[in-house]
Amino acid sequence: MRIDEAYAYLCVHDTNAAIDFYGKAFGATEKFRLVEPSGRIGHAELAFGPHTVMLCDEFPEVGIRSASSLGATPVTIHLHVDDADAMLAQAVAAGATLEREASDAFYGERSGVVRCPFGHRWLLGHSIEDVTPEEMQRRYTALFD
């Protein structure tokens, strides 16, 4: 048995607004959406470059709640981009909250973090050097010395 793909599937409090925001903040494009007669979006797919992120509105009647409703999220979505500084600025201009400015990290990436208006954390980074797992571990351990 094999796994062909893995998708992030985000529940948001307003999928229509999220589709608009993710387009402005990250350049995502809508692939399609499924809408109930009431207007609630049961499923939508966005293209983040060649990758798909799925979205839906809340369905509290079956326990599906957004990060905004919960007041927290344990998940961070990492977008590996060509210019983290520019993407962070674009996301903030679109309405994201900057949580961590871009900086160079021990693991060979320049990255920063924003939180979208829908409660999800987004780590935006680009590569600045190739680092082996062994060197990453050495550098990580050194942070605690």
Image: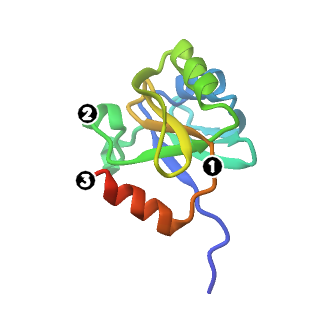
Q: Nearer the viewer, residue 90 or 83?
A: 83
Q: In the image, is residue 1 above or below residue 87?
A: below
**How many residues crowd mark 1 within 10 Å: few (<14), some (14–19), many (20+)?**
few
Gap between marks 2 and 3 measured at Cα = 31 Å
Question: Farthest residue in the top direction?
Answer: 93
Location of residue 25 in the rendering, given as x and y in whole percent from the top left corner = 60, 23
SS category of the residue bearing label 2: loop
Identified at 53% across, 45% down, the residue is: 78
Q: Earlier in the sequence, mark 2 or mark 1?
A: 2
Residue identifier under label 3 = 144
| In the foreground, 83 or 133 | 133
Q: Tell me whether circle 2 and circle 3 mark residues in contact (CB < 8 Å).
A: no
Q: Are marks 3 and 1 in contact (CB under 8 Å)?
A: no
- CA gap, disc 3 to disc 1? 22 Å
Query: What residue lies at 48% left-to-right and 37% top-to-bottom?
Result: 122
Q: Quadrant of the C terminus?
A: bottom left
Q: Amino acid at mark 1?
A: Glu
Mark 1 lies on residue? 129
| Residue 44 drawn at (x, y percent) | 61, 41
The residue at which mark 2 appears reads as 71
Distance in Å between CA atoms under marks 2 and 1: 36 Å
Q: Residue at x 51, y 67 (%)?
A: 133
Q: Nearer the viewer, mark 2 or mark 3?
A: 3
* Viewer-side residue, 96 vs 118: 96
Whether residue 44 is visible to the viewer of this picture, yes or no, is: no
How far from the left and from the top, in percent, is residue 72?
A: 28, 38
Q: Amino acid at mark 2?
A: Gly
